[in-house]
Amino acid sequence: MNRSFPPSLAALALVFAANPAFAVEAPKPKAPEMPPFEVAQPYPNTWYGRFGPTNCSWIDMGDGVLVIDTGATAADAKNLKAEIARTTKNKPIKWIAMTHFHSDSNDGFTTFLPTDATVFVNASATGLIASSIAQGKAKAPHVIGISDHIALVAGKQVFEIGVPAGNAHTAFDLYVFDASTRTVFAGDLVTTDRCPMLSDPDCDIKGWLAILERFDALGARGLVPTRGNPTGNAVPEIEKTRRYLTSMLAFLVEKKKQNAPEARVSGELAAEQLADYCPRELSALNALSVYRRLLSDGTTRPGSAAARPAAK
Ligand SMILES: [Zn+2]
């Protein structure tokens, strides 16, 4: 089934336009501005919203709510919490899953503290999350570090929460898969119509490609990324990401075999068309960041995470 998730911004605009208070009092529109958030409900128990730059999702599991990603800032997290309370009629947050730890995805986490929720993170990130909780001086929640995948069963609902075997977009990636709607909440592993970001110091293209295969094996149909618009048709987006990563890796391995200097890598990459949705500057940034740590077999030397004492 090819299903498009509803465009919520238009719906939101209609609500505002239909309200006389907004119609009469609204000031003249300034330059186009992104609203702080918008919310859509693709399935009866599932919502996602854009809070600041970040998509966050939540699922009503019956007697509690599963939240996926906590937003970029305390203000975004506050808006997210308010929307969760409004849409689920104040059901408690029982689970929080974090797709990775780039600040735009989960710096809002401490705003959720204290919480009775169980928190799921990549097992490599348990040290990071422990220090984040300690800084908040809040009652510590239960944290579960995942090193492969688990099934989260709540009532009749079954979710797979899993992680790559090693590094991928970062050292700390995690995905959530809703088996009933076959929707994957993919973090930044697939960003619809946006250039994949390979410049994290722990990025590993081979590991990233492997986790895309897991999404294939799961039969992912819906896709909610951290960045870009959610879609009911995950396959072409996963494929687009795979093509970009595969081409980038082949190009860089070839240059590595030639022992090419970085300037030549950058120059020759400009002549390549790896993906039309990737601006050249961004592709060059991606390429150089990986090239510096690349080994001739296509794997990468460990990045900064290996040096972090708290990391696994
Ligand atoms: Zn990211």
Image: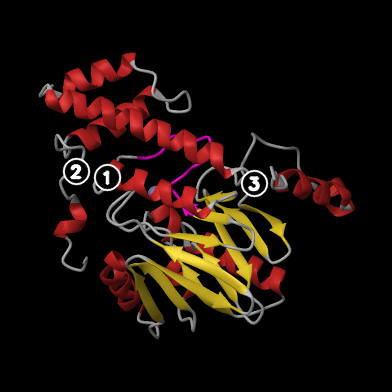
| Amino acid, disc 2 | Thr
Start-end of magenta stretch = 186-197
Question: Label 3, label 2: how many angstroms apart (C-alpha)?
Answer: 33 Å
Task: Find out whether the residues at labels 3 and 2 contact each other: C-beta distance under 8 Å.
Answer: no
Q: Which residue is mark 1?
A: 204
- Front one among 236 and 20: 236
Task: Please tell me which residue is depicted at 65% across the width and 60% down the height of the picture.
Answer: 47
Q: Height in image: 66 above or below 105?
A: below
Residue type, label 3: Gly
Q: CA distance from mark 2 to mark 1?
A: 6 Å
The residue pinned by badge 2 equals: 300
**In the picture, residue 43 is in which quadrant?**
bottom right
Taking the spot 24% from the left edge, 36% from the top edge, the residue there is: 289
Contact (Cβ within 8 Å) of mark 2 with mark 1 = yes
Residue 200 at x, y = what percent? Answer: 29, 45
Tell me the amino acid under the disc marked 1: Asp
Question: Toward the viewer: 143 or 31?
Answer: 143
* Dominant SS in magenta: loop
Query: Considering only vertical position in the picture, is 221 above or below 100?
Result: above
Q: Nearer the viewer, residue 25 or 253?
A: 253
The quarter of the picture where residue 253 lies is top left
Direction from residue 289 to residue 280 in the image, left or right = right
Which residue in the protein does label 3 denote? 232
Q: Residue at position x 51%, y 46% from top?
A: 227
Percent across and percent down for residue 153 are 55, 76
The C terminus, quarter of image: bottom left
Q: Helix, strand or loop at disc 2?
A: loop
